[in-house]
Image: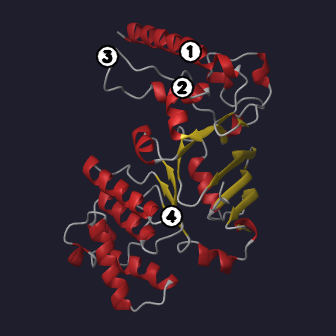
Amino acid sequence: MPEPLLDVRDLRVSFRTRTGAVTAVDGLSFSVAPGEVLGVVGESGSGKSVSMLAVLRLLTNPNVTVSGEVLFRGRDLLALPDKEMRAIRGREIAMVFQDPMTALTPVYTVGWQIAEQIRAHEQVSRKKAQARAVQLLSDVGIPDAASRVNAYPHEFSGGMRQRAVIAMALSCSPALLIADEPTTALDVTVQAQILDLIRELNGLGSAVVLITHDMGVVSQIADRVLVMYGGRAAEEGPRRAVFHGPRHPYTWGLLDSVPRVGGARLRRLPTIAGMPVSPGNIPEGCAFAPRCRLRHDRCEERPALSGDTHLDACWLPPDDRAALRLTARSSASAATDMDTEAAS
């Protein structure tokens, strides 16, 4: 196996609050190889965005504590001086932020902000940087990019701002792109264009960490999948293995809740019982145990992420997972039908 481009080891992020410390990321470890696309999935509050902000050292509030190791090309990003980290951030590692409405400065034109990003990391003239900004905006689907490059963020719709943020992230052809819900505010046509751009960047050798709720996007573009729950890794493995042979009950629930094109039509999609765990109330054992229909006594202990290339953090017997998934699915469907009848 090639040496990982990004190797995160035992990452922990906690927030100091009036009621005590709240752990948002709890011992997360994963790696990304050069040229690989890692899809990170999980419900809101599972720690996906916070963990990536910690990787880029963007959690600067004094009430935040970050520990562990984040090795990028062999260097621990958490231990680098600020000046060296600024040189890496945006040039070697770029991020597409989740909220496009606040990612752009309102008092500068969109083109100026993209050109500034280019000139901050490359020795190019202002004219060439502006020309590249126009090309990037055109690539992400902004109509009449030559004139819109001089527009201010408030003159762009939410979807157009999202595309401008993506253009900025791609401007320096980073070795690693972290994309946090890059297609959320876009229609399906532009979404396909953005995915093509990410594939193109990946084809040039760049690695991608794609955070998304859209399992369809993950199935199209990811090489490996990391499933997170409660700030921890629940399952990790090759895309085909995770989609066709999921091992963790939480992954079963995520996949079963996706509508199917073929097969019998269901009255209602199965749902995962209960509510996502709060960062301040994560149990000592398995974080998913309070919602799991197959929980047992050993779930009081915290399972370690284990396996060969397909890893999971669950105490269920490995050889019985397929049969147990059918049991859990039948139980979830029955509970969903009861809820439907009660509501009607």
Query: 10 Å neighbourhood of mark 1: few (<14), some, or many (≥20)?
Result: some
Badge 4 or badge 3: first in the primary sequence: 4
Q: CA–CA distance between discs 2 and 1?
A: 9 Å
The quadrant of the image that shows the C terminus is top left
- Residue located farthest toward the front when viewing the structure as drawn: 1
Q: Quadrant of residue 261?
A: top left
Q: Which amino acid is tagged 1?
A: Ala
Q: Which residue has dot 3 on it? A: 265
Label pair 2/1, CB-CB below 8 angstroms: yes
Disc 2: which residue: 252
What residue is disc 4 on? 206
Residue drawn at (33%, 72%) of the image:
136
- Residue 335 position within the rendered picture, expressed as x and y whole percent measured from the top left: 49, 11
The numbered dot on residue 32 is none
Q: Distance between the residues labelled 4 and 3?
A: 40 Å
Residue at (43% x, 90% y) in the render: 124
Q: Where is residue 263 in the image (x, y as percent from the top left)?
A: 33, 18
Q: What element carries label 2?
A: helix
Indicate the amino acid at tag 3.
Answer: Arg
* Residue 328 circle label: 1
The residue under label 4 is which amino acid type?
Ser
